[in-house]
Each structure stands twice: as structure tokens, then as C-alpha cells.
Image (cartoon, helix red, strand yellow):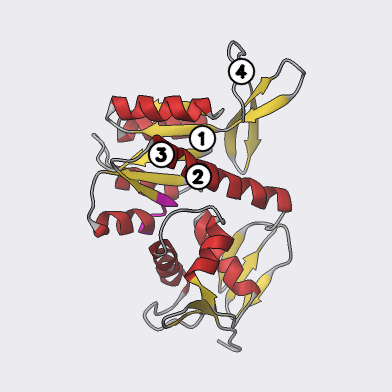
Amino acid sequence: MMTFKGVKPLFFLCRYSRHEKRIFMIKTCNGDVLLMETILVVDDERPIVEILKYNLEKEGYRVITAFDGDQALQMIERENPDLILLDIMLPVKDGFTVCREIRANKDIPIIMLTAKEMEVDKVLGLELGADDYVTKPFSAREVVARVKAILRRGRTREASGESRKERLTVGTITVDRDEVQVYNQGIPVELTLREYNLLVSLMLKPGYVFSRDQLLNQVWGYDYIGDERTVDVTVRRLREKLEIDPAKPDYIHTKRGVGYYFRRRKNI
């Protein structure tokens, strides 16, 4: 999206899915109206915030900022952004806590920013529902590329109407694709958007073994540049929410050395 100096964005209030959303647009000199997606950058290091803000605004995004966990949660409630860049080491409330609270009732894409190299921090962020992570020091170009990839994937799904189709039912699990809701034994199961999309991909082709690369392409997008462990973590979360015994799954199975498949079983 192009930016236009001296053009003041217009905004409208739109209510959907029980949430109020501010829709920002700019009108170009030839009369075209462009939608501005809103990115929330949360980091207590102001130079990093300013660098990210500058580079994202250059790409046409509206950028809002917060410098601690409480500020972030207040900003999310007020602005309902399209994507969040969330540092782990935050004052007041750390990034893990903020991520957990966001995921309690919102499916906003989250990219974790971390200065830590420890594997456990990356895995924990993904297990809490983050969509991706970037390790500091990072290039602003890399962060912008990941933001674009995640938002582009979301727009593609909305435009294609992928979720507006028939119900899928296997055993006790039902996916209502009009409601974008999963039920297990008739009880609603709260999933993140990534978990939901991964489940639908597997259920549409029961018995088919997907490689991790295939699932990354289908669920995260062809231009996703994270690593394959993201798939493993998301599958683990799905099993914990859907399986009676996640260690001995009835539905989502592993094909050792290959990937994952959803097995159709009758009379479970």
C-alpha cells in the first residue's frame, strides 16, 4: 500500500463479532479509497519501537505503540489492531502474560519479539498462541516481510470465503465453517485462528499425510519464513484441546519422519 504525505486518514467505527473495530482509510488524489491496517508495536525499548514504526508506516500501515504489558492490553481493547508485534521482556506484564490474555478472547495475529536464543522461549510463545517469532537483533525488512505475509494470508482467506462452507464432522468433532466454531461432543472448543485453520486443512482430507512444509504453505502461507516447529507446537495444542489422551490421539496422528494426518474413525 502506498502512503500519501499530508493526507489525513478517515476512520469509521464498525461492529462485528461482538467487537468494535476502527476502520482507517485514506482517500487518494484520484478518488481511490485505501484501507489502512493497524499494527500495534509493543516494546519497552523506544528506539526499536521507532524503527519499526517508521518502516511499517512507510509501507502504508497505521502504527500504534505501547511500552509495557498493561498499556498493550488497554490499547488492544480500544483499537482492536489487525496485528501485534509483541516483545517478551516487558515491564508490568511480560509478553507471555499479554499473549495469554489476548488469546482468551481474540484471534489477532501475534508476532513475538525476543532477545533470547533459548528454545523454550520460542516454543512457549507459540504454545500460548503466537503466530510467529523474530529473534533480536533483527532487520526491520525481515519484520515487515513477516507482517505482510501474515496479513496477506488473512486477506486471502477472507476473499476466498474458505470458512463459509459446509460442516465437517468426524467422530465427536464438528467444525461449523459458517460460525467458524469447533465442537467436541457438542461442546464449543475455543481455538486460535491458526489452530482452526490447521484443523480444517487436516479434516478436509482425512487419512492424507501432510508434510510440515505442506501445512506451513496451506495454513501459514507460501511466503511464511518461520520454522517447521511452529506446526508441531500447533498440533500439540490441538491435541490438548480435542483429544481425550493427547499422548494417544484418536484424531490427529503423526506419521513418523513425514508429518501429520487426520484419521477418520467411526463410533468413537
Work out whether 77 lies above or below 116.
Answer: above
Front in this rendered view, residue 188 or 178: 178
Query: For the residue marked with disc 1, what is the amino acid?
Result: Pro
Query: For the residue marked with disc 2, what is the amino acid?
Result: Ile
Q: Are marks 2 and 1 in contact (CB under 8 Å)?
A: yes
Q: Are marks 4 and 3 in contact (CB under 8 Å)?
A: no
Which numbered disc, 4 or 2, marks the residue closer to the eye? 4
Residues at marks 2 and 1, CA–CA distance in whole angstroms: 7 Å
Residues at marks 4 and 3, CA–CA distance in whole angstroms: 24 Å
Which numbered disc, 1 or 3, marks the residue closer to the eye? 3
The picture places residue 108, in percent across and down from the top left corner, at: 50, 44
Q: Examine the residues drawn in magenta and state their main secondary structure.
A: loop
Span shown in magenta: 127-132
Residue 247 painted magenta? no
For label 1, the SS is loop
Disc 1: which residue: 81
